[in-house]
Amino acid sequence: MESLLSLFVKSIFIDNMIFAYFLGMCSYLAVSKNVKTALGLGVAVTFVLVVTLPVNWVLENYVLKEGALKWISGDLASVDLSFLSFILFIAVIAAITQLVEMVVEKFSPSLYNSLGIFLPLIAVNCAIMGGSLFMQQRNFPTISAATVYSLGSGFGWTLAIVGLAAIREKMAYCKVPDALRGLGITLITVSLMAMAFMCFSGLKI
Amino acid sequence: MAEIKNNPLLTPLNLNNPLTVQVLGICSALAVTSKLQPALVMGLSVTVIVAFSNVIISLIRDTIPNRIRIIVQLVVVATLVTIVSEILKAYAYDVSLQLSVYVGLIITNCILMGRLEAFAMSNGPWASFLDGIGNGLGYAGILVAVGFVRELTGSGALFGFKVIPQSFYDAGYMNNGLMIMPPMALVLLACIVWYHRSKEKSLQEN
C-alpha cells in the first residue's frame, strides 16, 4: 500500500510526463490557450490513460512477455511475442479513444466542440503510448501498480497543462518580443516550469 | 518564389519546418537530444519512417474508408516502427538502449500523423515520398543542432569523444550539468524558434 502511494506521488511530481519526459508535447502546446479547454483535455487524457494502461498490462503479462503464454499450455512457455507489442498497444489505444470520443460527443457536445480535432488525436498522444511503454519497461508487478501509475501520470499531465494555460492567459497582456510570440515564449515558460518541478526530484514518501 | 514555396522537399527544411513552424513531434525531439549520437539516429529513423509510411498511405489512400483512417495509418506506422526498432536492436544495441521508449514513441510522433493527414492522403506517392524525406530531414536537422549544443556544453564531448581539452578543465572550466537536464532542451529550441522567426518575419504570430 505504501509503495503504491509513493508510486502515485512519484508519477505526478518526479516522473511528470511533461516535465521529465516531454510526452504529449504537441497537444500540450496547442491546447493550452485557456484553462477550461486545457482542463477538459487533461481529464480526457487521464481517463484514456487509466483505461488503456491496465488493459495493456494484461496484454503484456498474459500474451506478449516471454513465457507469458504458459497459462495456455506448457509448450508455449518459450514463445516471446514482445515484438508485437507496439502494434497491439496502439490498436488498444486507438479503439478506446474512438470509444471515448463517441461517449463525449453524446454526453457533452460543448466539450466535444471545444476539444475539436484533439480528441481523436489523443490516440496519437505520446503520453498515452508512453505510459504503456514505460509500464512495459518498468515491469510493474501487479495490475494495481499499473493503474495507480496511470492515474498519477494523468494527474501530473493535467496539472502541467492547466498550469501552463493559466500562465498563458495572463501572458496575453504582456509585451513579448515579436519573434518570440506564440511558440517561443511558451517553450521558455515550459522550461521554467520544468526547472521548478526538478526541485521535487529528491522527494520520498 | 512560387516554385520553391510548393516544393515538397525543400519547404519543410525552412519555411514549413515540422518542429519550429508546424510544432509537430516536439516530444521526442527534446528527450533524445542530450547526446549527439541518439539525436542523429532518431532523426534518421524518423526520416525513413515518415518517407515510407507516406508512400504506403498515399498508394492505398483511395481504398481507406474515412471513418477508420486513423487506425489504418497507425497500423502502417506501427509496422514500420517495429521493423526499425528490431533493426536498431540488432545493429546498434547501445543506441537503442539510450533511445529506450522513444523508438516506440515514433508511432505517436505527431509528424507522422500530421504529414499523413495533411499530405499523403491527398497526394501521389512520389510527391509524398519527397514530402516525407523533406520533413524528416527538417526534423533531423534541428535534433542534431540541439544535440550538438547540449552534448558540447553539457559533457564537453561530441559523439562521445572529448573535444574540450584537459587544459581547459585544469584552468577551471566546468561542464554545465544543467544542459543535460530536460529544461535546457526547451530553451535551446526556443532560441532556434526565436532566431528563425526573426529571420523569416512572415512566420511571426500576433
Image (tube, rainbow, N blue to C red):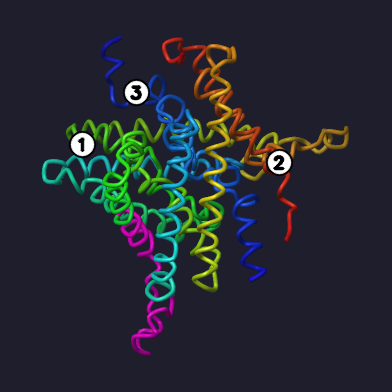
- Residue receiving disc 3: B10
Q: Residues within 10 Å of mark 3 (few under 14, many from 20)?
A: many
Q: Residue at x 17, y 33 (%)?
A: B124
Q: How many marks?
A: 3
**Earlier sequence position, callout 2 versus callout 1:** 1
**Mark 1 secondary-structure assignment:** helix
* Residue A96 pos. (x, y %): 32, 56
**Which secondary structure type mostly characterizes the magenta part of the structure?**
helix
Q: Is residue B104 above or below residue B57?
A: below
Q: Please tell me if label 3 and label 1 are on a single chain.
A: yes
- Tell me the subunit letter for badge 1: B
Say if mark 2 contacts mark 1, CB within 8 Å. Answer: no
- Residue receiving disc 2: B155
**Mark 2 secondary-structure assignment:** helix
Q: Nearer the viewer, residue B198 or B172?
A: B198
Q: Quadrant of the N terminus of chain A?
A: bottom right
* Residue B112 pos. (x, y %): 34, 40
Q: Quadrant of the C terminus of chain A?
A: bottom right
**Earlier sequence position, callout 3 versus callout 2:** 3
State which region is magenta. A66-94
* Residue B199 pos. (x, y %): 50, 12
Cα–Cα span, label 3 and label 2: 33 Å
Amino acid at dot 3: Leu
Q: Which mark is residue B31?
A: none
Cα–Cα span, label 3 and label 1: 20 Å
**Residue A33 falls within the magenta-colored stretch:** no
**Earlier sequence position, callout 3 versus callout 1:** 3
Cα–Cα span, label 2 and label 1: 43 Å
Q: Please tell me if label 3 and label 2 are on a single chain.
A: yes
